[in-house]
Image (spheres, rainbow, N blue to C red):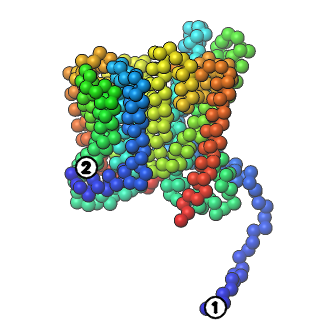
Amino acid sequence: MNSTIAMITFRAMLGRRRALLLLALPLLLLALSVVLRSTGYDDLDVSEDVLQKFGLATLLPLLALIAGTGVIGPEIDDGQLMYVLTKPVPRQVIVLTKLAVANVLVVVFAVVPVLLSGLVLTGTTARMTPAFTVGVLVGGLAYTAVFVALAVASRNAVTIGLLYALVWESLLGNFAPGAKSASIQQWALSVTDALTPASPVRASVGLAVAVPLLVLVTAAATALATYRLRSLTVASAE
Amino acid sequence: MSTSTIHDIGYRHYDGRRNGRAYVLRSLFVHNLRAAYGLGRPARAKVMPFLLGAIMLLPAAGSVAVFAVTDRPETLMRYSSYPPNLQVIIAIFLATQAPVLASRELRFRVVPLYFSRPVGHLDFVVAKLAALVTALFALMAVPVTVLYVGGLVTKAPDPGDQLLRYLGALLGCALFALVLSAIGMVVAAFTPRRGFGVAAVIAVYMVSTAVVLIVQGIAEQETNFTLSGWMGLFAPFNLVDTVQVRLLGASKSSVQVAPGTGAGVVALALCAVIVLGSVAVLYRRFRKAGLS
């Protein structure tokens, strides 16, 4: 960890009006929860729907994509990363710091809002709120690691990440069940499923498969990001 | 130094023919249209638009192939439901390419260089928007055309009706392109930082769609189909689909569309407001951009 790099990254992610963009999404989730609560549509089915479809399947991948690619992608593109790389700081420290910053952002802007939204919607019924919070947290760690690695490896990281999150996980998952088992979202859902007795939560992957895969993917992505950053060539922007 | 004079140091004036406003517009349009597909830029910029274009073509080609083999008309996809069915791909294309057109000049603060030449502020914005509309229209219309021509070649039944529905779907594609570009350009113009523009555009699409779907789901459970239909106006694809269904006679492809021809008129008016509003906002955004 390097506090200077962390501070610079935080400033780049949250400075000016960018924090508003990050804040808008969780605020919408909270607003939706409050509206549903106040109109009385807060039974377990609807709450599960909101937490899963909005929290786990929309908010989490989007925030992880913004945070994961945002902490390092723009700096690589405009060549500013060179000023960091030329300092006597080990590359893995740089990657780990960026990853930690992205994780903090995901926790603040995705995990905490899901926790609050769950509390608003269901309270502590069927332990669904803590279950989804943990699910979103472990999913967030894996997503962030993958997207940071993607940002180091490719200039089209955001598009590739979108294709993965939207096409692979959502669209193909509906047609090809095989694609469904190879998705971070389902693994996170499996963790959630294991933690709550609520029947609407149904994961297609067993916990014994999901947890090792989550750990493996997170570790592999971190290692890949470090490895790729070691031999990074900085070309001209655009 | 109380007196100062401007010296004539012998620069020649340009007395030749001036190409005029139409030429400026056309040049800007062509440049931006090429940029939307990464033409004239490195291969890295071409990969994504053409990959997404290829993905868009796959279902159309597959559908025609299945029809040619099985000869069952229901295997041919409906023309008007093609964009809504593939909305994710279209949204990703919009998210990756709208910032290419709308953010780059802002990010590098070069907009004043354009306006130091005889380029009108409105022309600049309209050319950019028109270029993105054309790019998106091509993305949707080419597969729909493949579907239609494939149906013709493999002798799909009822060619007259097919032609009508094909033309209706083309109109629908144009409206999809207009509305989506208008939204995408505005969002991208306010998020010039690299990567953020893409995320912001996709966030607007995903969040509006997700919220509308959740509310529609609840409304359907309550068998309140009217509310469910009107909610559809708040998601871009559902909005245009309402126009397609209510004014162009297509079958619905969304969860629910608002009832009656009046709903179609309202949806169309909303589309017009989005497009005109977008031009106005973009005009204001670019007029003073990069100065001071």
On residue B233, the disc is none
Q: Is residue A123 left or right of residue B232?
A: left
Q: Is residue A40 left or right of residue B243?
A: left
How far apart in space, not on screen, are marks 1 and 2 (Cα)?
A: 61 Å
Please state which amino acid type lies under the numbered disc 1.
Ser
Secondary structure state at the residue bearing disc 2 = helix
Residue at 47 percent of width and 15 percent of height: B222
Judging by the rendered image, the residue that carries numbered circle 1 is B2
The x, y position of residue A143, in whole percent, is: 31, 36
- B218 in relation to B119, above or below: above
User: Between A230 and B19, which is closer to the camera in this rendering?
Assistant: B19
Residue at 60 percent of width and 61 percent of height: B113
Q: Chain of mark 1?
A: B
The x, y position of residue B107, in whole percent, is: 49, 55
Judging by the rendered image, the residue that carries numbered circle 2 is A97
Residue at 41 percent of width and 54 percent of height: A16
The x, y position of residue A205, in whole percent, is: 28, 20
User: Between A198 and A103, which is closer to the camera in this rendering?
Assistant: A198
Residue B119 seen anywhere in this rendered image of the structure: yes
Residue at 27 percent of width and 34 percent of height: A137
User: Between B50 and A189, which is closer to the camera in this rendering?
Assistant: A189
The x, y position of residue A150, in whole percent, is: 35, 41
Q: Mark 1 packing: few (<14 Cα in 10 Å), some, or many (20+)?
A: few
Q: Is residue B160 left or right of residue B78?
A: right
Residue B158 placement: quadrant: top right
Residue A7 placement: quadrant: bottom left
- B131 in relation to B176, above or below: below
